[in-house]
Amino acid sequence: MQSSQTPVLDKFLGEVDRIVRDKNGVELQAFLVIEPPFNSLYEAMIAEMRKIYPKGKEGALEQRCSRMLKEAGEDAEGATWTIFVKFMANYLSFIRDVDPSNLLETYNILSELQQKANSALTSPSKGLIILPTVIAYARVFARLAIGLDKNPELIAHLVVQSNSEEDGRRETLPERAANILRTAFVTCLNDRGSGSGGVKDGKPDGKKVGIYKIANLCLKILFQCDKKMNAEQIFTNIYNQSPPLSIYPASERVTYLYYLGRFHFSTGHFFPAQMALQAAYDQCLASPACVGQRRLILIYLVAANMILGRFPTQSLYDRPEAAGLQAIFQPIVHTLIKGDLETFRRLVDWDSPNAPWLMRRYKMLLQIARLCEVIVWRSLFRRAFVLTGVQGDNETRKAPTLDLNYVLALFVFLEKRALHPPERLDKFGPAPDPPPEAYYIDPEFVGADGKPLEGYHANVSLPSMLNIESKCSSLISQGFMNGFISHKLKRFAIKGAKEKGSALAAGWPKFWDVINAEAPPDCPGWKQDVASSSAGGAFGPGMVVNLSNARPVGSGPLG
Amino acid sequence: MDHGSEMTLVEQRSFIAQSLEQRLHSGAASDEEKSFIDKALKQRRGIEQRWEKLKQNREKQRRYYIATGKMQDPEKPRRLEDAITLVGECQDMCPEYERVQRIYQNDVWAHENEPMSLTFTRPARIFDEYRMVKKFRRSAAGNEEQLPSDLRPPTVLKQTLDYLFAGLLHDFKLRDVQTFIWDRTRAIRNDFSIQQVTRDEDVKIAIECFEQIVRFHILSMHEMSAPDIDVPDYSWAQDYEQMDKTLLSLDAYYSDNRDKKYQSPHEAEFRAYQVILCLKSPVPNIEDVISRWPPHIVNDKRIRKAVEIYNAGLKGTKKIGPLQPSRTPSFARDDWADFWSGLNSDSYSFLMVATAEICAMPIRDMVLKSFVKGFKQGGKKRLEDWTLEEMGKILGFEDLRQTRALCLKYGFKICKTADGTSEFVDPSSIGTRPLETPDGLPSQMQGRQAGRRRELRKASAIIQGLSVLEAQRSNLIIHSEHVLTENIDEEVLPEDKPLFVASDEESDGAESEPIVQRRSSAEKNKYDRFIAG
């Protein structure tokens, strides 16, 4: 008789059946281990299977599971959970076959198991039981996918082209892995089994418990494998369907907000990036164990703020997680405040000493170079006004003005100096002409002798008056300077000096204030609390209360 | 008379044959035309039998491929890992099955005919199977599956591309063959994609082909945006779409083969286009992407130059995603003068400038918006500061008519200066409302920057990526006597869709008969190069 040949397996399946009857998801997860080494009981069971259900006998194994797992059969409402039987059969063949020394094969069979578990999760009545197992497997699965991505030689032959043929897109292994986990995430998100919209006593209910755990694993894969852009769907789904973030545990909140902030950062949205990162930083545990995490968040938080014209204080730099950051960020901040275009150029050069850190490691150099320069322009125009500006006259209604020729002279002076190594420059002398190595011509126009072909010229770009007018009009139209340009007179005229009391205050509003006033109050991807939420007190800086249901004072009752 | 689509293919063919017979015997045709008609009639005889035979063979062929494991058996499902990748066996630019099918279905495109017969009405043209190139077909449901005999291996794909770029483009104006090449390069990419090439030598060919196709599209968008061009069938959006997809595939080829033996010497060039084109992307994440490129790419000066253009041109006023609700970035450089002054210098290759031109309309929009805010003084004072010439500088136009047209489209008034010597654009003439982007702007307008850099080199030199010097050495420099096709501009539609109503042209009477242009034998010989082999 067959049952006597596999006593351990029979006992195991009986226990699983009992656990399912008890609806004990945590115990189930503890039972269905997948990582060797296995204890002796599991080894005995594996030995039985190798004998009675070796490779190729999966059908018989499934039948066996089907007979043993009575709980997966029809329940009182007539619903069955046959996919759980398939999952269990797959689990058993997984532990029978797994060979951790073969990373790719382990990934492949775990991928299959994960998908079976995901399917079992979809059952409206029983799926919840398997949620802890799904999450536990997802952790291992994510680790394997990331590991494989870091070993391209193992998966080089696996370039999977999509079926859409010539449209150029294709799915890589980490993307596919994230997509597999995303199906489990979507199941959690769409769960209707729990009452009260997924929230019970201020805590997530039903499968909604798993939303952020699984989302964070997907995000981990996508961020570590440089596929950030694929994270869009996850953020969008959460924004549309998730219960508020604040009712989830701190560790899940912090991880999620960190990824969301990074995502905004890499897509050029520094204001929402700053909001998410600030909240992540504020909610991250202060314990020494979390210093690494706090530091990572802080690096992006400081960069996002700096780009928006808000600079770190000394007390921030003094924190343990900020060690070393002052040396990197403060010199840049200094140039922004002073309008020191020359030093700014050197600091954000792709060959500067800090470039490997800022560019390769943290992927923020180019953003800083592109946007912080606007802050330098503003400070330089402001400085030019302090040095050479003509104060207005309220009596004659004459506006204060700045001669753009002075601004041009300053720009040219600093740009020219930036083309030379600093040790070759006098501190205060006139800027020498650009050195030969500063000239550039596209290789397309170079002759056989390495010189420009006739009619073409190597070039060094130095600002002209038109460039200054262009920068000036850019600053004006974005609200960083207040006034207008006279193209004929080459002067910038300041508006509103009388009202503000000083030409400087009227002409140059604070950079961050301008941005802050314009910024929409929400942060896409961050599900906020509704106004009536009982979560009170959990609001951090940058969090927004959704008041769409509120009525203006005195508008009376509805109807 | 309208024969419409009710005519069956057989009826169409017999109708065309009748028309040709009529013409042959009408006495109106010249001897030369008669000989063409005669040839055309002969070609069309027997095509039905040939087609029937090929159709019968096809099923046999299909079974053979399945039996020998060269093709997937649709009846037997397999695991994804065991899927069979098709390997092409077709040695022609167009597989015979498709050639005959398209001849049978009256779907031979203009440039698949003997060029001498292009001056005739469509039915009298002599198709030339050596000139036929596999056309693009979606592999959607309902379409026939491709057999290995329908797919061209990489070397044949490269030969086909050479025919299109070095042959066809050498002898015809780009505007006349654009739609044809657009379609056929798409089919070439599709063949590559189905075969999923992985061998080093195949990957090398694929990369070379995709690189040339990207160059073709950039050049094409530039040429087709010239002020004097009006090709009704041309679609800028489709040109852009296919360039975008080709570039996406290239991106994958480059990164997937990072550790292989073959590294394209042109990668930096195409990465530079990728950077500039990100100005059009709905998600400006290129900075993050660049930070991951290997040092030899990042250190290429062209990448830095491309970043400069990207920085100057990135608009602060466009709402961007990807997350909803989309929003404008907090701020941008919006430095239009920097954008143009860079492009005016020789620091940018022709194709880099042409790529920037693809993205330039939103920048002109930004220029005008920031112009209104920055230079409007308020009050009733009429500003005469901005003459049309000066506006041309900030809009990147050489041609004053372009400047005028664009300013008018935005609603600016253009007035004569008080002294009557020149015209100026008045920033206050749009009133107090914020400047709106008008509907119906062209997608691209040829600016002043690209012209001089292009002028010397032929299209095929640009597509091969030759520098000015290399083009001179390969004698791919434009001489004024080039251009054979002047006389058929009117006649040849860039995209020759199947067309039934031959009689309209015929019934116009003898006066409008097409005339064969006499050509020297030297010119005739030129065509011989076309024949693939």
Image (spheres, rainbow, N blue to C red):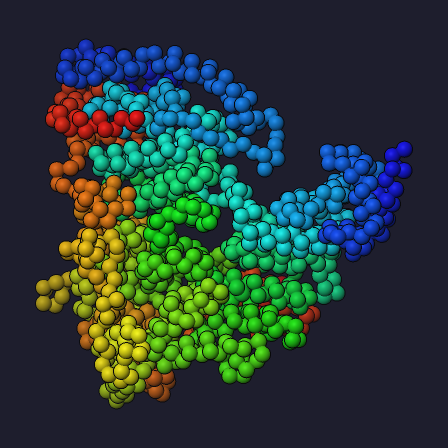
Q: Quadrant of residue B173?
A: top left
Q: Does any portion of residue A330 appear in the rendered image?
A: yes
Coordinates of residue B481 in the picture (x, y in percent): 12, 37
In depth, the one of A280 and A539 nearer the eye is A280
In depth, the one of A511 and B428 nearer the eye is A511
Coordinates of residue B190 in the picture (x, y in percent): 42, 36
On the rendered image, what quadrant is the N terminus of chain B found in? top left
The answer to whether residue B366 is left or right of residue B319 is left
Q: Quadrant of residue B231?
A: top left
On the rendered image, what quadrant is the C terminus of chain B found in? top left
Residue appearing at x 73%, y 33% in the figure: A56
Residue appearing at x 34%, y 49% in the figure: B266
Coordinates of residue A166 in the picture (x, y in percent): 44, 39
Task: Name above or below for residue B358 compared with residue B370.
Answer: above
Coordinates of residue A193 in the picture (x, y in percent): 73, 52
The answer to whether residue A379 is left or right of residue B74 is left
In depth, the one of A300 and A78 nearer the eye is A300
